[in-house]
Image (cartoon, helix red, strand yellow):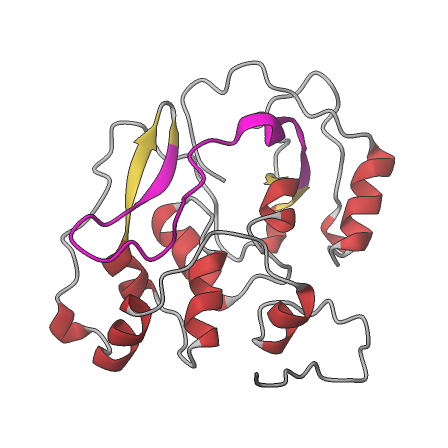
Amino acid sequence: MGARKDMGKTFSKMTQEEVDSFCDQWGIDPSVNPVAPGCDRTIDQCPPGSIALYCRHFEFSNLRYPFSVFVLNVLEYYRVSRVLHFEVLCRALGYDPNLLMFRRFFRLAKNGDWFTFETYQVDVCLISPLVSTLGSWKDRFFWVSESVIPFKMVWRHLDVVLNELDPFESKLNEGMLKALRACPSRLRPFPEHLLVFIGVSVLCDKPNRDPSFMSD
């Protein structure tokens, strides 16, 4: 869900059968009308009333549908994605993630014609390493109804100011800030039962049971 001026000539290679199978696996309801773009459409050529989703966001970046309030807040503020790892860290530490705390650790940056996030250099590197390129997974995307996002998604212009002034630490939860600084983490996909346990995912393989963890 980043934005660029010239998306190049990377087309989706997914068939409708592959899109349907992917959505069934990741709990994306058919009511949002998932559609294979076809071999002649690039990521910025969504039909009216649709947005694009990359498969890799679900497979590696822990994105789950329905999207959490925190993810929607960041999407609305920045208009880019890849924030789920931060949400998992916050919830694992017993805190609700929020946009103000996210801005303390990450800043919007340009990567060529794409927008992405970079770690804030004056603070601890909370997540390392960050994925710096979409690489070979740019050709696995599909359309869904824009109704999956409760606000209008727009393309960010390349020349706009990227970041507002950093939030003052006095406005942040001191305990949460201290806990996050003490818990740097490697960017990686998390097991589904962990995502279910902390409330990021609803894809529980035993719907009538709650996942649990044993200490030590």
Quadrant in the rendering for residue 130: top left
How many numbered marks, from 0 up?
0
Q: Which residue is drawn at the image coordinates 63% and 63% (left, top)? A: 66
Q: Which residue is drawn at the image coordinates 77% and 49% (left, top)? A: 23
Quadrant in the rendering for residue 73: bottom left
Q: Verify whether residue 119 appears in magenta.
A: yes
- The C terminus: image quadrant: bottom right
Residue 72 visible (yes or no): no
**Left or right position of 194 against 210:** left
Residue in front for this viewpoint, 46 or 133: 133
**Left or right position of 182 against 45:** left
Percent position (x, y) of residue 157?
33, 30
Residue 32 visible (yes or no): yes
Residue in front for this viewpoint, 20 or 76: 20
Residue in front for this viewpoint, 112 or 188: 188
Q: Against 64, is 211 above or below?
A: below
Quadrant in the rendering for residue 18: top right
Percent position (x, y) of residue 36?
76, 32
- Part of the protein shown in magenta: 115-143
Q: Against 26, is 114 above or below?
A: above
Q: Which residue is drawn at the image coordinates 42% and 26% (left, top)? A: 4
**Left or right position of 186 against 106:** right
Q: Against 27, is 96 above or below?
A: below
Q: Verify whether residue 118 appears in magenta.
A: yes
Percent position (x, y) of residue 79?
41, 45
Residue farthest toward the front in the current orientation of the protein: 216
Q: Against 110, is 90 above or below?
A: below
Percent position (x, y) of residue 60?
59, 48
Q: Which residue is drawn at the image coordinates 44% and 39% (left, top)? A: 154
